[in-house]
Amino acid sequence: MPKRPGWITVEQLDRELRRDKDWMARHRAKMKKLKDEERALAVAEKPLVHDLKRVGRKVKSVWDLVNTDESYPESIPVLLAHFDIPYPKPIHEGIIKALTAREARGGPAMAILLRAFRTEKNEHLKWTIGNALSEVADASVAKEIIELASDPSHGKARQMLLVALHKIGTEETQRILSKLLKQKRLSALYKGASMR
């Protein structure tokens, strides 16, 4: 493909940026800050990684669980035990996402996720918890999911609870879902979630 007038190649841009001392100084400072943050997170996450290794999971981070296709039922109790530890947000988010697994369906994971959804103030984390609930919720918690999905104070985080209602699939959850979807804002949220 011929080069358009005024355009430069990636290689040319790279050479120009490397000659710019101010840009290079900012770039080095940014990279150092990222490395420092990564080191701090690794230090903060050590107790969790240690406990995961004790149950046979050779991981460097909880995110290794999030990004695996393998099943990890032995890790669920460890994740639940660490859920309420005040880890930095990226680690806490990793714990929540690691609980978005069929191994967490039923039992204590649902109770912890439901409690966390009710109390979480950070909108992003609350949505992430709702996403986990959309994967692990079953008919045993239909009443709680209905209650939370019907409460407008939970804002956009209710999006994935609508998916949970659909997946639970009882007559009652389908009826409530249909009723909730008559609300324009919730209908748009649900469409956005179902397109994922």
Image (spheres, rainbow, N blue to C red):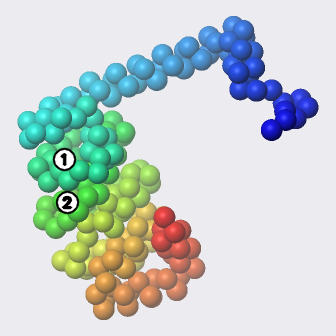
Judge left or right: residue 23 versus residue 174.
right
Q: Where is residue 120 in the image (x, y as percent from the top left)?
A: 34, 54
Q: Residue 103 lies in what quarter of the image?
A: bottom left
In the picture shown, does residue 130 fall above or below 76?
A: below
| 108 w.r.t. 172: above or below | above
Q: Which residue is pictured at 60% across the width and 17% down the height? A: 27
- Furthest-right residue in this view: 5
Residue at point 25%, 66% (across, down): 136
* Pointers 1 and 2 in contact (C-beta within 8 Å): yes
Amino acid type at circle 2 is: Ala
Q: Where is residue 195 in the image (x, y as percent from the top left)?
A: 51, 69
Q: Which mark is residue 104?
A: 2
Which residue in the protein does label 1 denote? Answer: 79
Q: Which of 44 and 4 is in front in this view?
A: 4
* Dot 1 amino acid type: Leu
**For mark 1, does the 10 Å Cα neighbourhood hold few (<14), some (14 to 19), or many (20 or more) residues?**
many
Label placed on residue 95: none
Instruction: Say if 42 sits above or below 162 in the image.
Output: above
x and y percent of residue 58 in the render?
18, 35
Query: Which quarter of the rendering shows the N terminus?
Result: top right
Q: Residue farthest to the front? A: 1
Q: Give residue 104's position: percent from left, percent from top.
A: 19, 60
Q: Can residue 22 be seen in this view?
A: no
